Amino acid sequence: MSSIENIIQQVKTELTTKNKIREDAHEYMRKAASLSKQSILLLHQKRFDNAQKMLNDAQTIITNLQEQAKEYPEIIYSGMFSATLQEYSEANILLTLVKTDRFVTPSEIRVPPVDYILGLADVIGECRRLALDYLREGEVEKAVKCLEIMDQIFIQLLALDEAYMLVPGLRHKSDIARRIIETTRGDITLEVRRKTLEDLLKKFETPLPKTKPKQTKN
């Protein structure tokens, strides 16, 4: 028969072990989220290979955490891990869109649907950054393409209907996305009008006739 001292000692050992696992897991989650954010920054710098490497490193960490969750689900599947998976999803969706012009699926990157959807909602803000970069570079058509992707994502998020209740935070993100899209639409419209006017003025420009230099008498 175990004494109360032995029971307490066993409980203390188990709690200490779980606390260490929790601390380590949270550190890895922060690392994976940071790598995902860095990947997005590198993408905006057009350093796609580096961005992919960052995502691969994040994927390794997330895969290890998911394996650990089989033994300690109550530790791994916390709010922090969900936030990490949203960052990871956002980076994957954006990089795949830029590189291959398609949407990566939740199963491809092994994330739960809810975290994927919340990450997808955040892609709209990153698409705005891409659109603004294209406008600064004078590539209006690419900026318009970004706006079309933003509209497409937003429409599909609205199509979730009742599922909004099953995705905490989605309504707030959708409200932000709506404002981002309308602001971006205004920016692109102004640039299109400016470029159209500029092209029109160039079309009607007539070069001044060349004047012959006056000859001086000796």
Image (cartoon, rainbow, N blue to C red):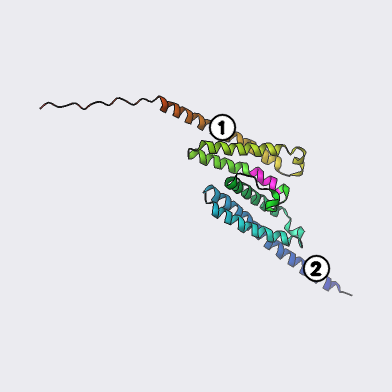
Magenta run includes residue 57: no
Residue drawn at the location 61% of the way across and 57% of the way down: 56
Residues in magenta? 115-122
Q: Which mark is residue 11?
A: 2
Tag 1: Cα neighbours inside 10 Å, few (<14), some, or many (≥20)?
few
Residue drawn at the location 70% of the way across and 42% of the way down: 170
Q: Quadrant of the N terminus?
A: bottom right
Above or below, 70 against 147 in this view is below
Viewer-closest of 100 and 47 = 100
Q: Quadrant of residue 30?
A: bottom right
In whole angstroms, how far apart are the C-alphas of marks 1 and 2? 61 Å
Residue drawn at the location 56% of the way across and 32% of the way down: 186
Q: Quadrant of residue 163?
A: top right
| Residue 191: % across, % down | 50, 32
| Residue 60: % across, % down | 65, 60
Viewer-closest of 211 and 172 = 211
Q: Quadrant of the C terminus?
A: top left
Marked residue nearer the N-terminal end (1 or 2): 2
Residue, disc 1? 186
